[in-house]
Amino acid sequence: MKGAIYALWHRELVRFMRDRSRLTGSLMQPIIFYLMFSGALYGSFKPYGMDYSVYFFTGTLAMITMFTAIFSTITVIEDRKEGFLQGVLISPVPRSSIALGKILGSATLSFGLAAIFLALAPFTGIDMSWDRVLPTLGVLALLSIAVAGLGFSLAWVMDSTAGYHGIMMLFLMPMLMMSGAFFPIEDAHWLISWVRHVNPMTYGVGALRHALQGEAPGCPTFTVCLIGAAMFAVAMFALGTFVVTRRRARDAI
């Protein structure tokens, strides 16, 4: 069981690192977003009195974890088409081990790329003392597992990469944008303001702000955000395990 989990985890890492276009896209796309948004709104938009480059830095960390999970969990669809997934499914390995190996692989990639970007925080004026770095890394780990589990669950039930990208733009991107990652939304239209309370990404982004910036105006308390992020991670991992353990005829296709 442990060998199967490690093999799937290691395969995800090696596969991702060897695909330079996927690696470059996962890291550079959020960085480009950060430079464009922070540069365009510099001096003209100061949420809660802080520079937008500081405010959006936390949102970019969340964006990196989500984008990396999206790109890495596409391999589930590719593995099904190439026949690798069918070989794994007929092996004596418990299906829960398949979910754990794939989710941990994607989460490790998400966490690693976000940690690389986190090292750039001092250039934006954010304090990088250890009492902030360590909690931030812990929250990033939770958020990475959550979005990896979500991406894996969606990819498992999809048959095409085009369909997966369509669901991503329809479902995952609004989750990120309505979490407060890009701009404050507590004073938005009542419908958007209501959605943010049930959006699990809101608590992940809020926990990141508390951990990295020491405060998170417009967000629930750090304890509430941390509990919300932990519940999000547990729920998405459970969902990933559930969709894998369901035996359906399409798994043999």
Image (tube, rainbow, N blue to C red):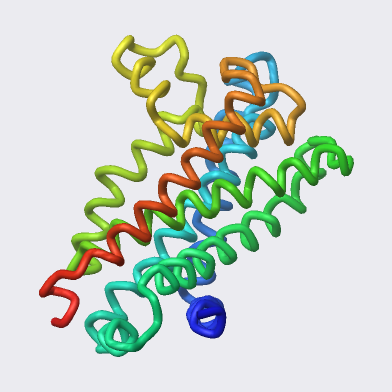
Up/down of 190 relative to 152, above or below: above
Q: What is the quadrant of residue 246 in the picture?
A: bottom left
Question: Where's residue 183, x and y in %?
Answer: 50, 25
Q: Residue at x 65, y 43 (%)?
A: 139
Is 126 left, or right, of 185 in this rendering?
right
Is 207 left, or right, of 128 in this rendering?
left
Residue 14 seen in this snapshot: no
Which quarter shows the C terminus? bottom left
Of residue 205 and residue 42, the one placed in the foreground of this image is 205
Question: Where's residue 129, x and y in %?
Answer: 88, 40
Of residue 231 and residue 127, the one placed in the foreground of this image is 231
Is 70 left, or right, of 230 in this rendering?
left
Up/down of 87 relative to 127, above or below: below
Q: What is the quadrant of residue 94 in the picture?
A: bottom left
Residue 46 seen in this snapshot: yes
Q: Residue at x 63, y 28 (%)?
A: 52
Q: What is the quadrant of residue 107 in the picture?
A: bottom right
Question: Where's residue 119, x and y in %?
Answer: 77, 53
Is 56 left, or right, of 95 in this rendering?
right
Q: Residue furthest left?
A: 249
Q: Residue at x 47, y 51 (%)?
A: 66
